[in-house]
Image (tube, rainbow, N blue to C red):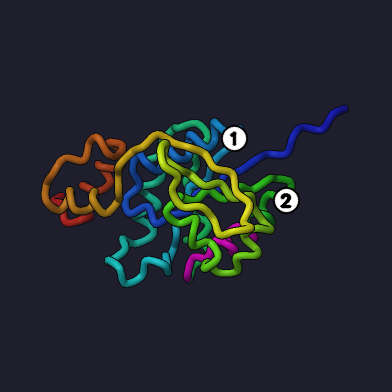
Amino acid sequence: MQRPDPPRIGVLGGTFDPPHFGHLAAGLEVRHRLGLSKVLLVVANDPWQKSGLHPVTPAHLRLEMVRAAVGDLDGLEASALEIDRGGESYTADTLRELRGLHPEAELLLVVGSDTAQGLDTWKRPSELRELATTVVVDRPGPSGGRPPAGWPAVVVEVPALDISSCDIRSRFADGRPVEALMPAAVIEVVRSRGLYGCGR
């Protein structure tokens, strides 16, 4: 009897402050193109690379927004792994923990082309290469950033969605429309929690 293929799990980490259609498009496209069992949207507990850049929304509220964003989308799941672990969020630790939880699975680390070039500056980069296949999400057109020389990676083009969490936060604060940028369920969480300077 032939053994079933091992599951393939995508790991898309982020601050998700807030999550938007760009995050969802990346997760869905990677899952479809690479035949993944699922893609985990792993919410950073303490995103050390962004500390000091702007106030970061508390982790439990960002997790609530990601859960609202994925809703019933097939194959996307919100993950509280880094929040439950506490402390600063390092991808190597997350992949190590996922390897323990899913020893039979193939893990694929999903990163944007804007961060791919700096992978060798992340904590314990050799573990990242050892524990997971790197997938670089790129937009159609001229190539964006790629991992450092000698770092194997798969490149997946996704639809070009010019959306940024920074712009969305500014839009909420200014009362500008955000409906075309993120799911209605996330907008409801933002407004009900009074996040990003918007009124309740």
Other-residue count near label 2 (Cα within 10 Å), few / some / many at <14 / 14–19 / ≥20: few
In depth, the one of 141 and 76 nearer the eye is 141
> Is 156 rendered above or below residue 149?
above
| x 23%, y 54%: residue | 195
Residue 70 position within the rendered picture, expressed as x and y whole percent measured from the top left: 42, 39
- CA–CA distance between discs 2 and 1? 20 Å
Asked if residue 162 shows in the view, the reply is yes
| x 41%, y 67%: residue | 49
Name the residue beneath numbered marker 2.
Answer: 103
Element at label 2: loop
| x 45%, y 57%: residue | 115
The three-letter code of the residue at mark 1 reads Leu
Element at label 1: helix
Asked if residue 42 shows in the view, the reply is no
| Quarter-of-image position of residue 162 | top left
> Is 63 rendered above or below residue 120?
above
Magenta stretch bounds: 88-96
In depth, the one of 118 and 143 nearer the eye is 143
63 lies left or right of 119: left
The three-letter code of the residue at mark 2 reads Pro
